[in-house]
């Protein structure tokens, strides 16, 4: 049986990706990508890879991102057809680039002779992702030698060798082997007709390379990221130092703070929350000039993105900022005030015996305790509050989740609410978020991907999202009946619009007149009035509307199967007034 060159090359490419450690492939259907679809389905049937099919390329990209995130940075491939399908991957590519997640983008394309001819679904896909990818190559269509009848034969050994070489470099670049900077890579794959096998393909062996192909290299082993490297001592006097742990900082940030006796300002998705030095409500506490002015030095790990007070702290001329930034990527220094950028945490920083608490640390701990008291008061009494608020919902979600749970949190208000309440009722769950660009794009799909990957590790996944974040990616709920089952609870805090903008300067302007408020509501508040129950019903997803926090806790503690949406409606009110009043109360409590 003659196998067309496109199908031969696609089979070789998929086999090689699998041999290099790719365990999940997300496919959005299309015609030009048919050779890849057949090859991936064949590999999935042989048990060599897990296939996930989604009809929306944007959702497929974020599903792959979630799978990689949930599998702690494993490479995941995404397959699309040509044309606009490729462009729909761009939001997920940008997020993966800034987060450092290894996505392998396999985009089908017309052969070179059809480009620029007006052929259907053909555009310039070469370099479409620009600087967002670590590696990109335009792979020419395999031609194969003609047989006696003049028909194209199988792809040549040279073509397959070249293809495997490209695949190896792509996986290496995605994992950051040479650069120390993982991220997405792009293989733009041209295919000529015929795109389908002429008959059923022979079965794919489960434990060997494809018959007749050079055996692939052994699977690449992902080395542990370098955590302890030689670094200079911290500049200046470290006595009045704080550790800022941004997204992805990891446990080094918490360990460093505790060994050195420094206060810790940890974002929810830092992986460093909790512990005796973690300061509750630090965002509000930085509004006290007396406290903020006592800081002389900051050590930054991860990528801090949540807090304007933290950014103002990092920009103070009187504060010495040291940034720990492994890899070759850009280091976080939005204030452009970093005095030192280090490739890792120096071993000597961990060798110091834990000192007795300094007066500086004790002062920040006491301030954090006062902030916890205020936060407890404003989130625990629904009789006074008149029902659930966004803060009380975030607290309830954090409190009910344990060490075997993962929480995916949406951008805008939910992640900031979680930051304030995390740790009030215990250590809280491990938190993941799309903080590379901090957008609301694809969050439902990301959560589904995380849940699929986390289930293999025995972990249960929930998500805490705002209503606009949920609606923006409601298509992520769509899954075919043949797809891998997934268990995921999505808590949607519904305040009917984009109330995050009320906490910014736009909210202050809206309060100046009725006309300004009307403009604010139209272009920032964006009330929608959507019926989430009916939307969920259309997607075949369970929906539950809960009206108080005890019911929410009960719903989260109950066993669940499949995707479930738990909606909690909270008052829109004036988030700016609430935010300002909360910060005022926290600062006042410290100053009493």
Image (cartoon, rainbow, N blue to C red):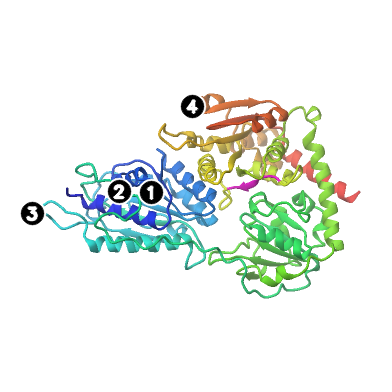
Residue at 80 percent of width and 58 percent of height? 292
Q: CA distance from mark 2 to mark 3?
A: 27 Å
Percent x, y for residue 287? 79, 52
Dot 2, how many residues are within 10 Å of its Cα: few (below 14), some (14-19), or many (20+)? many
Question: Which of the two residues, 534 or 563, is positioned nearer the viewer here?
Answer: 563
Percent x, y for residue 527? 60, 31
Splitting the image into 4 quarters, where does residue 561 fall? top right
The numbered disc on residue 274 is: none
Q: Is residue 94 left or right of residue 523?
A: left
Residue at 32 percent of width and 41 percent of height? 30
Q: CA distance from mark 4 to mark 1?
A: 30 Å
Q: CA distance from mark 4 to mark 3?
A: 54 Å
Q: Secondary structure at mark 1?
A: loop
Instruction: In the rendered view, tell whether residue 91 sits above or below residue 463.
Output: below
Tell me whether the residue at label 1 lies in contact with that at label 2, contact meaning CB atoms closer than 8 angstroms. Answer: yes
Mark 3 = which residue? 148
Dot 4, how many residues are within 10 Å of its Cα: few (below 14), some (14-19), or many (20+)? some
* Mark closest to the chain's N terminus, 2 or 4: 2
- Closer to us: mark 2 or mark 4? 2
Mark 4 = which residue? 540
Q: Secondary structure at mark 3?
A: loop
Q: Secondary structure at mark 4?
A: loop
Mark 1 = which residue? 48
Instruction: In the rendered view, tell whether residue 67 sits above or below residue 167.
Output: above
Q: Is residue 555 left or right of residue 530?
A: right
Mark 2 = which residue? 204
Percent x, y for residue 186? 39, 56
């Amino acid at each position: 049986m003659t196998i067309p060159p496109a199908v031969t090359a696609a089979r070789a490419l998929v086999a090689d990706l699998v041999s290099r450690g790719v365990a999940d492939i997300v496919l959005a259907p299309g015609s030009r990508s048919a050779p890849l679809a057949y090859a991936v389905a064949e590999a999935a049937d042989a048990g060599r890879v897990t296939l996930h099919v989604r009809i929306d390329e944007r959702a497929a990209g974020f599903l792959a991102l979630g799978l990689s995130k949930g599998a702690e940075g494993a490479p995941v491939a995404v397959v699309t057809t040509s044309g606009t399908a490729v462009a729909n991957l761009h939001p997920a590519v940008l997020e993966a680039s800034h987060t450092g997640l290894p996505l392998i983008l396999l985009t089908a394309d017309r052969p070179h002779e059809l480009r620029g001819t007006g052929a259907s679904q053909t555009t310039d896909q070469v370099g479409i992702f620009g600087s967002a990818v670590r590696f990109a190559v335009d792979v020419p269509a395999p031609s194969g030698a003609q047989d006696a009848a003049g028909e194209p034969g199988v792809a040549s050994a040279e073509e397959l060798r070249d293809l495997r070489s490209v695949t190896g470099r792509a996986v290496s670049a995605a994992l950051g082997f040479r650069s120390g900077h993982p991220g997405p890579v792009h293989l733009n794959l041209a295919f000529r007709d015929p795109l389908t096998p002429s008959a059923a393909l022979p079965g794919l062996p489960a434990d060997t390379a494809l018959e007749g192909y050079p055996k692939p290299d052994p699977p690449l082993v992902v080395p542990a990221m370098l955590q302890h490297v030689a670094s200079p001592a911290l500049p200046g006097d470290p006595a009045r130092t704080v550790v800022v742990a941004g997204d992805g900082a990891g446990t080094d940030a918490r360990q460093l703070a505790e060994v050195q006796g420094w206060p810790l300002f940890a974002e929810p998705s830092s992986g460093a929350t909790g512990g005796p030095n973690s300061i509750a409500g630090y965002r509000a506490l930085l509004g006290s000039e007396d406290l903020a002015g006592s800081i002389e030095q900051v050590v930054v790990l991860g990528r801090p993105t949540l807090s304007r007070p933290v950014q103002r702290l990092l920009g103070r001329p009187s504060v010495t900022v040291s940034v720990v930034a492994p890899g070759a990527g850009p280091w976080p220094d939005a204030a452009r005030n970093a005095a030192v950028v280090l490739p890792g945490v120096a071993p000597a920083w961990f060798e110091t015996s834990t000192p007795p608490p300094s007066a500086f640390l004790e002062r920040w701990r006491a301030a954090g305790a006062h902030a916890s008291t205020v936060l407890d008061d404003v989130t625990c009494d629904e009789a006074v509050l008149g029902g659930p608020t966004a803060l009380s919902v975030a607290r309830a979600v954090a409190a009910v989740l344990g060490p075997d749970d993962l929480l995916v949190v949406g951008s805008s208000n939910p992640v900031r609410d979680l930051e304030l309440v995390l740790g009030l009722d215990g250590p809280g769950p491990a938190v993941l978020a799309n903080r590379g660009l901090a957008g609301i794009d694809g969050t439902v799909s990301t959560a589904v991907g995380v849940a699929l990957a986390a289930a293999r590790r025995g972990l249960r996944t929930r998500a805490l999202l705002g209503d606009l974040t949920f609606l923006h990616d409601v298509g992520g709920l769509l899954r075919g009946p043949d797809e891998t089952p997934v268990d995921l609870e999505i808590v949607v805090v519904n305040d009917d619009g984009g109330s995050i903008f009320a906490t910014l300067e736009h909210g202050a302007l809206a309060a100046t007149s009725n006309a300004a408020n009307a403009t604010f509501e139209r272009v920032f508040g964006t009330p929608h009035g959507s019926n989430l129950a009916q939307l969920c019903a259309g997607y075949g997803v369970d929906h539950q509307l809960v009206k108080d926090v005890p019911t929410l806790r009960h719903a989260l503690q109950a066993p669940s199967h499949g995707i479930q949406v738990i909606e909690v409606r909270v008052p829109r009110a004036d988030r700016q007034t609430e935010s300002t009043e909360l910060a005022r109360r926290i600062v006042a409590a410290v100053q009493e």
